[in-house]
Image: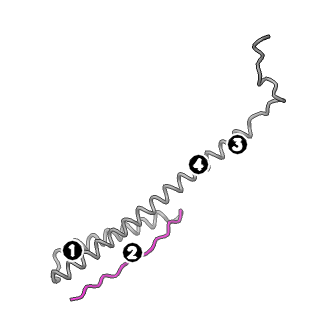
Amino acid sequence: MQVSVSSSAGQVSSSSGGGGSEIAKLQKQLQTLTEELKGLATSDMEPKAKQQKAKLLQAQIQMVQAQITAIQRARQQEQQDAQARKMEAAAQAAREQRPPSADGLGSQVDTYA
């Protein structure tokens, strides 16, 4: 008996706008694959075919988990980059709001007078 399992885990883009919906799709796919793997135990397939299908399902599960992790890491990196940009903009604004010193007056104190 030949076992064929179609791979429904394709490449996922990690755009900042679609990360949440992509993760939700992948989590649903992960649930489906896990249920299929659990159902394999009670199937009436030949043992060798059952073993092959189990290996394929486990590989697909690992691939989906890796994709979820990659999207989460990309989203976290985007958040860190955005926070760094905000902090830099705030620092730049603070530098621009400082009043310039008048030719260095008041920046030196004569302690020997």
Residue at 69%, 39% in the rendered image: 94
Residue 100 rendering spot, x and y as whole percentages: 79, 33
Q: Earlier in the sequence, mark 1 or mark 4?
A: 1
Q: Residues within 10 Å of mark 1 (few under 14, many from 20)?
A: few
Direction top: furthest residue: 113
Lateral position of residue 30 relative to residue 15, left or right: left
Q: Earlier in the sequence, mark 1 or mark 3?
A: 1
Tag 1 near tag 4, CB within 8 Å? no
Tag 3 near tag 2, CB within 8 Å? no
Tag 1 near tag 3, CB within 8 Å? no
The residue pinned by badge 4 equals 84
The residue pinned by badge 2 equals 9
Splitting the image into 4 quarters, where does residue 45 fall? bottom left
Direction front: furthest residue: 112
Q: Amino acid at mark 1?
A: Gly
The residue mark sitting in front, 1 or 3, is 3
Splitting the image into 4 quarters, where does residue 46 fall? bottom left
Splitting the image into 4 quarters, where does residue 55 fall? bottom left
The residue pinned by badge 1 equals 39
